[in-house]
Amino acid sequence: MPKREYLALFIGDILVFTAALWLTLALRYLQPPSAALFKLHFVPFSILFVVWVLVFFLAGLYSRHTPLFQSRLLATIVYAQVINVALAALFFFLTPVFGIAPKTNLVLYLFVSSALIFLWRVSLYPRIRSGKKIRGVLIASGPDAKRLAEEVKTGRYTFAFDYVVDTKEAPSHEVIQRACRVAVDTGVSFIVVDLSDRAVSSALPIIYDAAFHKKRFALINAVDLYQELFEREPLSLINYEWVLGNIGVSRLYDILKRGTDIVFAFIVGAVSLIFYPFVILAIKLDDGGTVFIEQVRVGRYQEPIRILKFRSMSGNDDGRYGKNGKTSLVVTRVGKWLRLLRIDELPQLWNVLQGDLSLVGPRPELPAIAGVYSAKIPYYNARYLVAPGLTGWAQLKHDRDPHGGHDIMATKEKLSYDLYYLKHRSLFLDLFIILQTVRILVSARGS
């Protein structure tokens, strides 16, 4: 970013910090703060503002590629503000000379300032910054790279590609020539490359050298930018190294996720028992068949698990489909509503308690279908590195999931969302998925 844009962000952040302090005091005392009260807090907080800007800098909120990755902004701001509030608490504890110990105010300030900073960074700042788009170059190949180039070309983004080099069509020496052009072109601020592409490897020394000589230069992995724009993984740009590099997660996350699963499943599962008699009666009056069905699904590490559901179809084929890959069963009249409201999956809360399922994760597939997908779709088995879930990122983002059969193309696209979750999974993302699922259930969308 140019120096004037750094300055604009810095001044804007300070003003937002100040406005957040005033609003915090107003909410705390349910009236506009007096000049004396605001001054009492502003003097020590002005010292903290400088420290907080430094934390923002260390968190990457002033980096060159920040305008390219807006979706990560909220999480980064929240994490930075948590650190800022912790530093403020330590500051007031060690310097009682200011005569205030704003414990409640600091907690309230965390939420107010995070919201205002996000609003400033995402909504207001892009409107006042220079109208010129950040100039960049894309060097990659394949269908996902073409889709990325087309999205940037037609979408409303703060950046654009000056030119695109398809490494499959351009010879290696041309890729190198384009890299040299980037090195001397002062108007190019970033370059997006497929780091796994062999043609790019020959140009990396030039790009590497350019990174040390250009003041406004950023090297972006094409996979990262694709994730940002499409919220899924580009299957044509990943490899086994990518999969192996994204299987790890903190032990603390696993413990907290499992604890959340148990608490939520126990509470919701117990409450849902109230509705069981009505569901059972509706199924019996509809066609008189069995109420529950039990199916074998593929769980974590490809271990078989048995899940329980309310029957929503005319029978239980357990995934044994005909030659055309479609089931001969049909959804019942009651089953249509059970699926629409996701009531048919309520018994699976007990699978969550047992640990076979999680609240959030890839959809658990039937073994027969999973075998077809594993044989025909690269990296499909990577989704088994995490526990399957009642809901998930793919279930939210991909509404063309085949039911009662298999579909290779649709499932490949769905896998791209599962792999996105595999890489980005966190308690923050899990909570977002759960809240979005509740919103969908309330609006009765999906089946």
Image: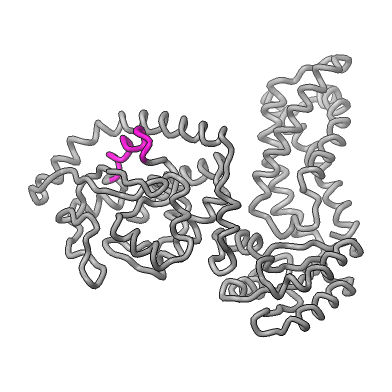
Residue 25 on image: x %, y %? 73, 27
Q: Which of the two residues, 217 or 196, is positioned nearer the viewer here? A: 196
Taking the image as shown, residue 296 lies to the left or right of residue 23, namely left
Residue 402 in the magenta stretch? The answer is: no
Q: How is the image coloured?
A: one colour
Taking the image as shown, residue 223 lies to the left or right of residue 187, namely left
Q: Residue at x 76, y 32 (%)?
A: 84
Taking the image as shown, residue 245 lies to the left or right of residue 321, namely right
Residue 62 on image: x %, y %? 81, 50
Count of marks placed on residues: 0
| Range of residues picked out in magenta | 345-356
Image quadrant where residue 219 sits: bottom right
Residue 36 on image: x %, y %? 85, 22
Q: Which of the two residues, 13 or 199, is positioned nearer the viewer here? A: 199
Image quadrant where residue 116 sits: top right
What secondary structure is the magenta-colored segment mainly?
helix
Residue 209 against residue 19 in the figure, above or below: below
Residue 176 against residue 314 in the figure, above or below: below
Residue 353 in the magenta stretch? The answer is: yes
Q: Residue at x 60, y 52 (%)?
A: 245
Residue most extreme to the left: 288
Q: Residue at x 46, y 43 (%)?
A: 434
Residue 170 on image: x %, y %? 70, 84
Image quadrant occupied by the C terminus: bottom left
Image quadrant occupied by the N terminus: bottom right
